[in-house]
Amino acid sequence: MPQGTYHFPKGFLWGTATAAHQVEGNNTNNNWWKWERDGHTDGSAAVAADWWGGRWREDFDRAAEAGQNAHRLSVEWSRIQPTPDTWDEEALEKYRAMLRGLKERGLTPMVTLHHFTDPLWLGNYGSWETEAVVPLFEKFVRKTVDALKEYCSLWCTINEPTGYALNGYVTTGVDSFPPGKNNMKLAMQVHANLIRGHAASYRAIHLLQPEARVGIAHQYRPMMPYHTWSPLDRLLTNAFNTTVNSFALTLADGVMRSPLGSIKIPEAKGTQDYFGFNYYTREYVTFDLRHASTLFGRHFYRKDVELSDDGFLAMEPDGMYEGLKWVVRTFPNLPILVTENGVNSADDSMRPRYTVQHIHQMWRAVNFNWPIKGYFHWSLVDNFEWSFGWKYRFGLWGLDVDTQKRIKRPSADLYAEICKENGISSEMVQKYCPESFEKLFPS
Ligand code: BGC
């Protein structure tokens, strides 16, 4: 049986990612809390993983003991700025304590400044629908970065602007986000304002902290033509890719491409010091007369592919490699951070092979000297999965929401071995997911 180890470069960042609303609990002053109260979600975040109550300490201990050397978390705008004219210094002090807690445990902090939630008061200013939001967000960013910069120099301004705009302004199904509108034109306006907010913050952060590294966590969900020979499938795939994946190009040339035409945002050009890459799955596109509302294009997971709990994600590790290739070609020499990758697998049956096979694809990319600097698994502990509430479990550690007890999944040990080894060995694959052995170590 072949033996070996796929090693990563020295200093590679191995961590997990979380977001404030999903783990903190009691974020009562934001639009998601209201959305949950209005009955749009499967349950409420409630106390979540109780990080605001202090349980971040035990979870950071777990991460450190498991050999992780980085953690990506987000701060909650509505806590730091509870009204347009007030700052909550105690909230900032709590975040400072959390970041200090990471450093004391040997974990490099990465802070996301906006991860899907908005303060309720932002609604009075039109949320992200008008440009009025840009100076408001920038003001919040200045205050927060100034307060936290002693402990952090790696910033993500906005998590998945595309997810925020499409789920909130186009999607009408179970996975929709607040405000639950269905208006593509507005979605594109919102997207443009998120990019404007990012660009303004990029400059503001660099003025406060010249050594800062600032970027966006872009969602990348490749769309592939189902019949490669079909010009229609290929055409529709391009249209879907423009809707889902092309927004990152705005940071290359200052032009936001959208299905409704282009919007110039020249100030966005060159405003990222790394490319934040969130990858979960890939989809296929085909021409289908029954799908008039999406230009007769239907997108779906392949039939023969393994699906996660409830069919939420398809296991498509090659898509990760292809996505990284796209990033390297589009943004040559820009460092890349895999800011999210993971799977909902409550009984952990799928997570070990999902994790190993995706990290293996990332290794292939690293092996070409593509500048990938770190990987953040989603997520450290089960957390509130937006519209799906507690139904989908993404944690290396499970969470009993009622008792707050953490339950270690086998994947936590597997990921610990990967972090400590700085690579994937044949022994690990044999131990945690022997069914993937032949794929990674062919005889
Ligand atoms: C989001 C996370 C979410 C994860 C799993 C990502 O798109 O940034 O907040 O929990 O997907 O669905």
Image (cartoon, rainbow, N blue to C red):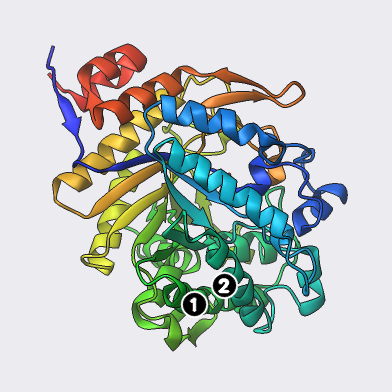
Tell me which label, 2 or 1, sits earlier in the chain: 2
The answer to whether one can see residue 402 in this image is yes
Q: Nearer the viewer, residue 335 or 73?
A: 73
Could you say which disc has been placed on residue 204 in the image? 1
Residue at mark 2: C-beta within 8 A of ligand 1: no
Q: Which mark is residue 177?
A: none
Mark yes or no: residue 381 visible: no
Residue tagged by mark 2?
142
> In the rendered view, would you say 198 is above or below 316?
below
| Number of other residues with Cα within 10 Å of mark 2, as a class: few under 14, some 14 to 19, many 20 or more | some
Distance between mark 2 and mark 1 Cα atoms: 6 Å
Vertical comparison of 19 with 415: above or below: below
Q: Residue at x 63, y 58 (%)?
A: 116
Amino acid type at mark 2: Arg
Decide: is 127 above or below 63: below
Q: Quadrant of the C terminus?
A: top left
The image shows residue 131 at horizontal and vertical percentages of 65, 84
- Assign a secondary structure to mark 2: helix
User: Seen in the image, is 166 located left or right of residue 62?
Assistant: right
Q: Up-down: is 381 above or below 425?
A: below
Q: Position of residue 368 (x, y in %)?
A: 14, 50
Residue at the right extreme of this rendering: 38
Q: State the image coordinates of residue 258 (x, y, percent, origin top left).
A: 50, 76
Which residue is pictured at 15% across the width and 23% down the height?
A: 442
The amino acid type found where label 1 is placed reads Ala
Please rate how many residues cluster around mark 1, counting C-alpha atoms within 10 Å: few if below 14, some from 14 to 19, many from 20: some
Which structural element holds mark 1? helix
Cβ–Cβ under 8 Å for marks 2 and 1: yes
Q: Quadrant of residue 304?
A: top left
349 or 19: which is nearer to us? Answer: 19
